């Protein structure tokens, strides 16, 4: 699986960071930084919560 990010939809609220801080980070400028786009099995649950919790639907997980 891979993370797909739509920068135009992201408002920098940071819910994704609260679910998976090892992958998502809101930078000082309010922009989302993704640390690695490949989804590992041990991170899958947290990433699915981050995607489901995104209020602007800026994140998706797709099969690679």
Image (tube, rainbow, N blue to C red):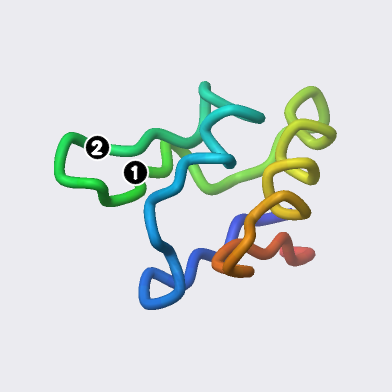
In what quadrant of the picture does the N terminus appear?
bottom right
32 vs 51, left or right, is left
Q: Nearer the viewer, residue 35 or 14?
A: 14
Q: Residues within 10 Å of mark 2 (few under 14, many from 20)?
A: few
Q: CA distance from mark 1 to mark 2?
A: 7 Å
- Height in image: 32 above or below 7? above
The residue that mark 1 highlights is 33
* Residue at the image point whose x is 71% and y is 40% from the top: 47
Q: Which mark is residue 27?
A: 2
Residue at coordinates 68% horizontally, 43% vertically from top-left?
A: 50
**Of pointers 1 and 2, the one earlier in the residue sequence:** 2
Vertical position of residue 43 compared to residue 33: above or below = above
Percent position of residue 8, x then y: 37, 77
Res. 40 image quadrant: top right
Q: Position of residue 13 (x, y in %)?
A: 45, 47
Image position, residue 59 (x, y; %): 60, 62
Q: Tag 2's secondary structure?
A: loop
Q: How many marks?
A: 2
Is there CB contact under 8 Å for labels 1 and 2? yes
Quadrant where the image shows the C terminus:
bottom right
């Amino acid at each position: 699986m891979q993370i797909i990010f739509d920068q135009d939809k992201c408002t920098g609220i940071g819910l994704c960071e609260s679910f998976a801080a090892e992958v998502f980070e809101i930078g000082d400028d309010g922009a989302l930084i993704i640390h690695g786009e490949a989804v590992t099995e041990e991170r899958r649950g947290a990433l699915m919560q981050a995607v489901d919790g995104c209020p602007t639907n800026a994140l998706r997980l797709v099969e690679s």
